[in-house]
Image (spheres, helix red, strand yellow):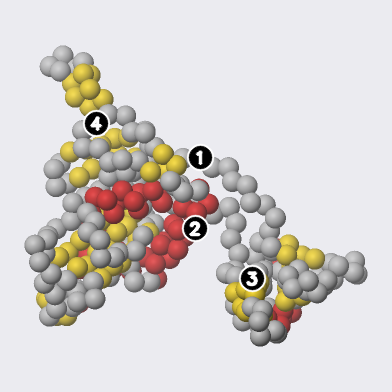
Amino acid sequence: MPLGPKDITPMEMATAYSTFANDGLQVDPIFIERVEDSDGMIIFENTPAPERAISVQSARLVNQVLEANVRGGTGTRARLENQVAAGKTGTAQDFSDAWFVGYTPHLATAVWMGNPDEQIPMTGVDRGAMGRGNVFGGSLPAMIWGAFNKTYHEGLQPLTFEPPEWTRAGTRIRTDQEEDDYRELIESFCGVDNEDAEIDTDEDGVVDFCDPGKTEFEFDEGIGECPMLFEPVDSDEDGEIDGCTPPTTTTSTTTLPPTATTGDPATTTSNTTPSPPATTTQPPT
């Protein structure tokens, strides 16, 4: 969810990121859960209606990437002690806007720092323990996000994100320019800088499998000498692995995360929904 020139509110950002935590289901935020009369009878109840925005697999892949960003990337100042978190930083080129938008399996929260009336560069600012300097997404916004969520998650059961059903090394895209008037993009599942490992048995231009002895993958002992989740190939049936193919299973069976309670501390309203979190906190200005 990149940040661009178009104005967008923290609520919109938190709602978008909550979709990742919800396994790809988008839920509109609500401020009022229900209204009761003096006798306790419910006269109005707000029932969320989740809609599928992206696939479960896509959401879980994003979770994996953004969790790594908090664990060891630009969002490390948002880390929580006993709860996994995922998130993304954002910084305007002149430091006039700084964001940290993140989430856990319990709550999605967006923090924005800036001036709503005009673009004022936040340079030479006292950043506490970080010293004086520029405000960027991984500095004060991430620290504010972490401080709020540390308090919010006290007493809550630590939860983890469901992993993607399967992942493999990134593909390498190269061009074949043997003829001046012909150019073709070729996708290889052998990974980056592993051209020597590519095996094309029928010479049709499509990589059939990878030579494990020439790849730079980290190998998994549980499946022979092939990269994690790749399937070994013994083409000559001599008992030795000749290469590896990517996994063939792509189906996905999932269950939704547990019920979560979210809130907006700026208005002290609570929102308990039968679906995963879909609300946020209003950031400081």
Question: Can see residue 169?
Answer: yes
Which residue type does callout 3 highlight? Glu
Who's the residue at 19% across and 24% down the image?
35
Residue pointed to by mark 3 = 187
Which residue type does callout 4 highlight? Glu
Asked if labels 2 and 1 touch by Cβ distance under 8 angstroms, the answer is: no
Q: Nearer the viewer, mark 4 or mark 3?
A: 3
SS category of the residue bearing label 4:
loop
Spatial distance from mark 3 to mark 1, Cα to Cα? 33 Å
Spatial distance from mark 2 to mark 4, Cα to Cα? 31 Å
Crowdedness near tag 3: few (<14), some (14–19) or many (≥20) residues, C-alpha within 10 Å: some
Q: Is residue 28 above or below residue 81?
A: above
| Residue 257 rendering spot, x and y as whole percentages | 44, 42
Residue 130 picture quarter:
bottom left
| Residue 192 rendering spot, x and y as whole percentages | 60, 77
Residue pointed to by mark 4 = 33
Residue pointed to by mark 1 = 255
Q: Is residue 57 above or below residue 217?
A: above
SS category of the residue bearing label 3:
strand
Who's the residue at 20% across and 61% down the image?
112
Residue 241 picture quarter:
bottom right
Spatial distance from mark 1 to mark 2, Cα to Cα? 16 Å
Q: Which mark is residue 61?
A: 2
Who's the residue at 66% across and 79% down the image?
182
Residue 57 relative to residue 72: left or right: right
Spatial distance from mark 3 to mark 2, Cα to Cα? 20 Å
Who's the residue at 60% across and 64% down the image?
168
SS category of the residue bearing label 2:
helix
SS category of the residue bearing label 1:
loop
Mark 1 and mark 2 lie on one chain; the one further toward the N terminus is: 2
Mark 2 and mark 4 lie on one chain; the one further toward the N terminus is: 4
Which residue type does callout 2 highlight? Leu
